């Protein structure tokens, strides 16, 4: 079936609105959180409070001191993973709080 000129997928519409209204980085933050949910064990994932993006920097807030330390020790590994998955040009740094 041929797609009509104005027929869009819902995900395309959400991305378009995000681009127009300037919250595109929030969608990427949700994608990063989904990636972490798949990558980490469920109990570890529950320790992640939030994921945000500000000024090309991913900010991950973690409740558990042990998990926080692990993320800080493997910071370059996680940053590289996120850059590989979502694009090198989107992120320059990773902060663990």
Image (cartoon, helix red, strand yellow):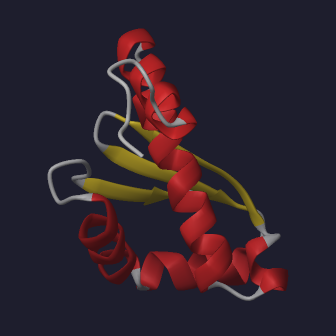
Q: Identify the residue shown where x is 47% and y is 75%.
A: 72
22 w.r.t. 30: above or below: above
3 w.r.t. 72: above or below: above
- Residue closest to the far left: 89
Picture quadrant of residue 37: bottom right
Relative horizontal placement of residue 24, taking residue 81 as reference (left or right): right
Q: Identify the residue shown where x is 21% and y is 53%.
A: 92
Relative horizontal placement of residue 51, taking residue 43 as reference (left or right): left
Residue 24 lies, in percent from the top left, at 42, 30
Q: Identify the residue shown where x is 32% and y is 69%.
A: 85
Residue 9 lies, in percent from the top left, at 50, 37
Q: Nearer the viewer, residue 92 or 1?
A: 1
71 w.r.t. 52: above or below: below
Residue 71 lies, in percent from the top left, at 52, 78
Q: Identify the residue shown where x is 43% and y is 56%.
A: 95
Q: Nearer the viewer, residue 5 or 27?
A: 5
Relative horizontal placement of residue 38, taking residue 48 as reference (left or right): left
- The quarter of the image holding the C terminus is bottom right
Picture quadrant of residue 54: top left
- Residue closest to the far front: 1
Residue 38 lies, in percent from the top left, at 63, 79
């Amino acid at each position: 079936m041929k797609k009509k000129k104005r027929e869009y997928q819902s995900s395309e519409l959400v991305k378009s609105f995000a681009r127009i209204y300037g919250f595109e980085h929030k969608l990427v933050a949700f994608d990063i959180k989904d990636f972490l949910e798949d990558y980490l064990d469920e109990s570890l994932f529950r320790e992640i409070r939030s994921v945000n993006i500000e000024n090309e920097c991913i900010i991950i807030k973690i409740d558990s001191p042990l998990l926080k330390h692990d993320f800080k020790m493997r910071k370059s590994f996680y940053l590289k993973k996120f850059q590989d998955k979502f694009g090198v040009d989107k992120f320059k740094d990773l902060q663990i709080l």
